[in-house]
Amino acid sequence: MKKDERANETSVTVRFTRGYMCFDEGQVKDVTPQFGYALIDSGVAKRVKSPKRDKQMSGAPMEKSL
């Protein structure tokens, strides 16, 4: 698995974490899995509800229903 230049496109590897999300800075926060947090290939965790809407939700606020 080598990093492609198309990492910024929609077809990025999204991995769902088990109640944890890792930030680019290396911080780990305990969150509820039901919120739909995902770990992006670039190492930045962002809140997503659906893989298709990942591009739109990229700028969504982290704490919404907390």
Image (tube, grey):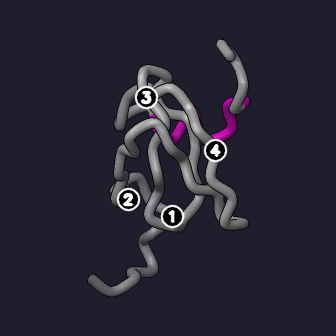
Q: Secondary structure at mark 1?
A: helix
Which residue is located at x 45 percent, y 43 percent?
38
The stretch of residues the image draws in magenta is: 54-61
Asked if the magenta segment contains residue 18, the reply would be no
Q: Is residue 46 above or below residue 39?
A: above
What residue is pinned by disc 2?
A: 12
Q: Is residue 17 left or right of residue 32?
A: left
Question: Which amino acid type is shown beneath numbered disc 1?
Answer: Asn
Question: Which amino acid type is shown beneath numbered disc 4?
Answer: Lys
The C terminus appears in which quarter of the rendering? Answer: top right
What residue is pinned by disc 1?
A: 8
Q: Secondary structure at mark 4?
A: strand
Q: Secondary structure at mark 2?
A: loop
Please provide percent x and percent y for residue 19: 46, 36
Q: Secondary structure at mark 3?
A: helix
Q: Earlier in the sequence, mark 4 or mark 2?
A: 2
Please provide percent x and percent y for residue 42: 52, 67
What residue is pinned by disc 4?
A: 29
